[in-house]
């Protein structure tokens, strides 16, 4: 869809509105990981390994507040695990103390959590947590996650689930499973035990990502396949829903798969976030996408989600449905398709 044609549509009106301010922000507390998952491109990252300084972190949050970005704060590294930051829980507490963000979220393999930290994490103010793991056993865990940490991961998962229940479930905990195809999950002792604490369990089947071509079919758990490459006519939601700030203050537009920050749009130490969000770098990316000129790393990205399919943007549309009534059917269809998948 050409940019001139798009200017006459409701979609163009929506995109211009989304350019005003981000719906969410992501902070990468560290890009260091304690695993080497076969299905992840962590091993291909060439960025300097670092942990975000607390003062840099506080500066970022103040600049986020200036943007009036309240919906969601994500502590999700592009690659890495947040618990490799020894001040991670303190950073969550600080964010919560600001009484600003509606939701504070993170994603982790939980290997790096210390038993002494469990209670502190549960009471930290974290809203939602997704745990990525494998329940097949020690050898399969080692093959898929690249480290011999199965027992540690299981101990941490159940300690956290038990503490969360004891405190009245302050954190919405989900478990995302990476298994070989056709693994007998129903009869797995760990699965049955997890069910006693949460039913938010998902299994990634035939829907793996290729990390923009870096991950090959042989890297996946046995029998698993990649998701299909979608048509990318409509701009990617990453261009409009928010940004990611790395440990050195660099700002990138893609928090999902841009492991080396090819899509960098600025640095918080050199400009304010409002200027970065509406600045020349991101403006050029948006305009080029509308012309069909996608960044190189985006062309073969299987993680692509259009602006009309992303949950946060859909939530925004539904809040302003009288301005965008034509998108209601599209939203309903996408939600039904996610349920089918």
Image: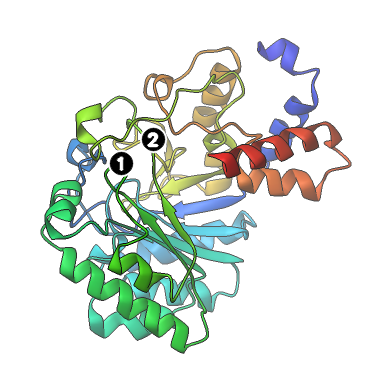
According to the picture, the residue beneath numbered tag 2 turns out to be 206
Labels 1 and 2 touching (C-beta < 8 A)? yes
Count every numbered label the image shows and give the total: 2
According to the picture, the residue beneath numbered tag 1 turns out to be 181
Which numbered dot is residue 295? Answer: none
Snapshot colouring: rainbow
Q: Quadrant of residue 337?
A: top right
Q: Residue furthest right?
A: 322
Please report whichever mark, 1 or 2, sits nearer to the chain's N-terminal start: 1
Judged left or right of residue 80, residue 280 is right
Dot 2 lies on which element?
A: loop
Choose between 294 and 144: the one closer to the eye.
Answer: 144
Residue 272: x percent and y percent?
52, 48
Residue 308: x percent and y percent?
66, 34
Choose between 100 and 159: the one closer to the eye.
Answer: 159
Residue drawn at x 49%, y 44% as measured from the top left: 243
Residue 205: x percent and y percent?
39, 41
Residue drawn at x 74%, y 27% as measured from the top left: 11
228 is higher (above) or lower (below) than 17? above
- Residue 224 visible in this rendered orientation of the protein: yes
Q: Residues within 10 Å of mark 2 (few under 14, many from 20)?
A: some
Q: CA distance from mark 1 to mark 2?
A: 8 Å
């Amino acid at each position: 869809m050409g940019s001139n044609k798009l200017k006459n549509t409701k979609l163009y009106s929506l995109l211009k509105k989304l350019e005003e301010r981000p719906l969410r922000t992501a902070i990468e507390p560290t890009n260091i990981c304690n695993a080497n998952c076969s299905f992840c491109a962590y091993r291909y990252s060439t960025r300097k390994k670092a942990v975000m300084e607390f003062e840099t972190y506080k500066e970022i949050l103040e600049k986020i507040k200036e943007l009036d970005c309240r919906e969601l704060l994500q502590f999700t590294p592009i690659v890495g695990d947040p618990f490799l930051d020894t001040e991670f829980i303190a950073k969550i507490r600080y964010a919560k103390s600001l009484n600003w963000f509606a939701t504070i979220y993170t994603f982790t393999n939980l290997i790096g959590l210390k038993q002494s930290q469990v209670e502190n994490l549960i009471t930290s103010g974290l809203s939602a947590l997704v745990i990525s793991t494998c329940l097949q056993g020690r050898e399969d865990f080692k093959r898929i996650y690249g480290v011999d940490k199965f027992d540690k991961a299981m101990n941490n998962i159940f300690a956290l689930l038990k503490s969360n229940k004891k405190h009245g479930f302050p954190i919405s905990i989900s478990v995302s499973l990476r298994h070989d195809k056709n693994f007998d999950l129903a009869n797995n002792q760990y699965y049955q035990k997890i069910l006693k604490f949460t039913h938010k369990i998902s299994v990634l089947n035939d829907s793996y990502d290729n990390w923009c071509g870096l991950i090959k079919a042989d890297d996946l758990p046995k029998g698993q396949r990649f998701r299909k490459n979608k048509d990318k006519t409509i701009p990617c939601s990453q261009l409009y829903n928010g940004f990611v700030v790395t440990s050195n203050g660099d700002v990138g537009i893609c928090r999902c798969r841009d492991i080396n920050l090819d899509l960098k749009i600025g640095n918080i130490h050199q400009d304010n976030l409002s200027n970065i969000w509406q600045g020349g770098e991101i403006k050029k990316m948006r305009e080029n996408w509308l012309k069909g000129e996608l960044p190189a790393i985006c062309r073969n990205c299987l993680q692509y989600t259009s602006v009309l399919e992303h949950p946060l943007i859909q939530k925004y549309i539904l809040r302003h449905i009288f301005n965008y009534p034509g998108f209601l059917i599209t939203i309903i269809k996408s939600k039904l398709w996610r349920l089918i998948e």
